[in-house]
Amino acid sequence: MNRPLRHIAVVRFSAMGDVAILFPVLSAVLKQNDLEVTLFTRPQFVPIFSSLKGLNIHAVDLKNKHAGPLGLWRLAREIKAINPDYFLDLHDVLRTKLIRTFLGMLGVSVRTFDKGRAQKNQRVKHFDPSAPWLLSTHERYAAGFRTVGLKVNLDPGLRPPIKSQKGALIGFAPFAAYPGKTYPLDLAKELCKGLSQKGYNVLLFGAPGSEAEQLAQVAQDIKNTKATAGQGTFAQELELISSLDLMIAMDSANGHLAANFGVPVITLWGATHPSLGFMPYGQSPERQLYADRGQYPELPTSVYGNKLPQDYTELMRSIPVSDILSKVTQILA
């Protein structure tokens, strides 16, 4: 008879959205199994998991201490030192493949997960909006844990009650990693005005620096609208997100972060599509709004939104502000 698992080491480095998707999976693993879990990730992502009881977090310095093959060998030895039953790679890139190789040399059992790269690329190449959606990234992560014999039942459960429509606090994050997933700032300002006129309070989220400066311009002179970007630590930003009644986000980390707190999320999809597996946790297809495939028939243009035909630069403008306002009203009514 196999002995019970005591300790699992897990790795996921970037990007932030993919790391945030791991939160509900780790939550389920810790609640449904009696074992220790250590997560190896970048230090800036540590606050995402601060509420998970029983999770050990090992910050990885990929720029200095753990940089290059020698640094990854050092990291492999650190993983070996905590004596896990398994090392589970939930990133599966060249860097983590090298870590797996080193750990195999050190006698540590390793497992990975199915990213579904071929399925995703095939779906983009021959996109059919009526075809069944691919397995979500949440479920792909969960399947990785199941390969080592753990129980992982992903059930979003009940969403917390939404406050009354009047005075509701709405987060809005118009930026994303690529232009084909970013909402135009003039339309973002129009949306903020519309939300304000309906009596909502709006918080704008984005990265420090250029995004923060642009969001400050968007919020200028609009009642009950404030740009939070660059105003505090990441942990403080997460606290603000947890207090929202609703988040409006692109295909970006902010939507996943809000979903982890049980916040309803409206996601605006441009160059990408949720059927590839990246819809925020616990949300419904009805909360997804799309760029117009009638105008842009090649959508989605890529799995991650990093490829965009030259004449598709304005595709996000095909998601009307009026449609977003109607969806907000529908959810908060």
Image (tube, rainbow, N blue to C red):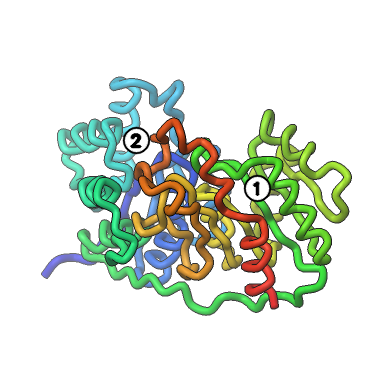
Q: Nearer the viewer, residue 17 or 313?
A: 313
Q: Residues within 10 Å of mark 1 (few under 14, many from 20)?
A: some
**Please, which residue is most extreme toward the front here?**
295
Q: Position of residue 282 (x, y in %)?
A: 48, 68
N-term mark: 1 or 2: 2
Q: Quadrant of the C terminus?
A: bottom right
Q: In the image, what residue type sits under mark 1?
A: Ala
Q: Look at the numbered disc 1 and give the secondary structure of its residue.
A: helix
Q: Which residue is mark 2?
A: 78
Which residue is found at the position 63% from the left and 48% from the top?
A: 173
- Residue 235 tag number: 1
Q: Nearer the viewer, residue 52 or 184?
A: 184
**Is 239 on the left or on the right of 249, as rendered?**
right
Vertical relation: 218 (above or below) 323: above
Q: Nearer the viewer, residue 255 or 27?
A: 255
- Residue 224 tag number: none
**Is 226 on the left or on the right of 272, as rendered?**
right
Which residue is found at the position 26% from the left and 61% from the top?
A: 143
Q: In the image, what residue type sits under mark 2?
A: Glu
Q: Look at the numbered disc 2 and give the secondary structure of its residue.
A: helix
